[in-house]
């Protein structure tokens, strides 16, 4: 059984894109702090079920639900599954992301819509559907990246979608704050996850991050998950509409 004195004991959390990488680390962190966890995934069914088994081993409830977070009908199906098993939702972590890694001059309208819908619109869809379940307030945390404010090769449309995401966070924080719901962003530096393997300049990105990070060359999914966890704690009740950068100091290094 989970310790009833755990910081987030009795809370229910939805983590999108939870089967791998930062999402997986975040789901584990929240479960270890006392949360029941809804594990959203799209392609990684076996990984999602394995994660649910880990959560249950901690004495918490877990549910794996397949859904594409950028599609309204799919998000409706996700929340129908949540309502069938849970009566409330306290934490939403909008982590699932996708995009196209190409120079801006090679991008199309289809690429633009895919990036914006998956990386930015998804947050609004999740917030709209979570609101009726957040009867006692709650926390919504969106995962962004330094590409929202920095130019990065092959990252133009993804970066633009992350900038849109951070702007939306501020608007949602203003709208939902009076309802006791705090909305914030965690913006991560370079984390060597499966997603980074798709970058054509992966080795260059890792080397640059390593050389310019004052706190050390390694940034792990657990580091990012820890920041999400901090924003979910009661002590963070007055943090709203903020962007917490987790990059070991990379962004301040010129």
Image (cartoon, grey):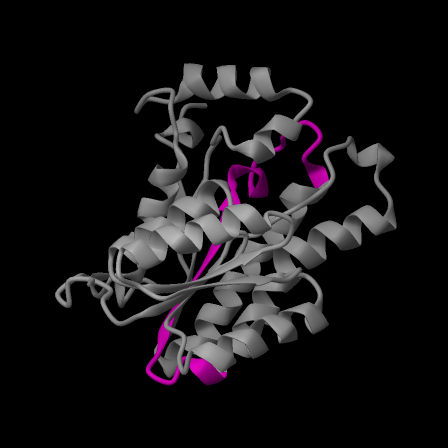
Q: Position of residue 139 (x, y in %)?
A: 38, 67
Q: Position of residue 148 (x, y in %)?
A: 57, 43
Q: Is residue 134 magenta?
A: yes
Establish if 18 lies above or below 200: below
Q: Is residue 23 magenta?
A: no
Instruction: Count the marks.
Output: 0
Q: Name the residue nearer the viewer: 47 or 173.
A: 47
Span shown in magenta: 132-156
Residue drawn at point x = 71 percent, y = 73 percent:
73
Establish if 164 lies above or below 60: above
Residue drawn at point x = 27 percent, y = 66 percent:
238
Residue drawn at point x = 39 percent, y = 32 percent:
220
Horizontal side, residue 55 vs residue 233: left or right: right
Residue drawn at point x = 55 percent, y = 75 percent:
81
Q: Quadrant of residue 233?
A: bottom left
Q: Name the residue nearer the viewer: 39 or 91.
A: 39
Horizontal side, residue 84 vs residue 219: left or right: right
């Amino acid at each position: 059984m989970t310790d009833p004195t755990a910081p987030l004991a009795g809370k229910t959390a939805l983590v999108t894109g939870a089967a791998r990488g930062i999402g997986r680390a975040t789901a584990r962190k929240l479960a270890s702090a006392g949360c029941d966890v809804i594990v959203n995934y799209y392609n990684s069914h076996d990984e999602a079920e394995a994660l649910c088994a880990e959560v249950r081993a901690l004495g918490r409830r877990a549910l794996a639900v397949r859904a594409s977070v950028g599609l309204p009908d799919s998000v409706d199906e996700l929340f129908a599954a949540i309502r069938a098993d849970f009566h409330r939702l306290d934490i939403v972590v909008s982590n699932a992301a996708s995009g196209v890694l190409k120079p801006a001059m090679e991008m199309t309208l289809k690429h633009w819509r895919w990036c914006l819908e998956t990386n930015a619109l998804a947050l609004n869809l999740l917030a709209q559907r979570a609101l009726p379940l957040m009867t006692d307030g709650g926390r919504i945390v969106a995962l962004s990246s330094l590409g929202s404010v920095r130019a990065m090769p092959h990252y133009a449309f993804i970066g633009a979608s992350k900038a849109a995401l951070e702007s939306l966070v501020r608007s949602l924080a203003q709208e939902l704050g009076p309802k006791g719901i705090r909305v914030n962003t965690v913006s991560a530096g370079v984390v060597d996850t499966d997603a980074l393997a798709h970058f054509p300049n992966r080795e260059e990105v890792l080397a640059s991050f390593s050389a310019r990070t004052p706190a050390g060359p390694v940034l792990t999914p657990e580091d990012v998950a820890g920041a999400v966890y901090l924003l979910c704690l009661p002590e963070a009740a007055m943090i709203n509409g903020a962007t917490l950068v987790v990059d070991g100091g990379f962004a301040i290094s010129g």
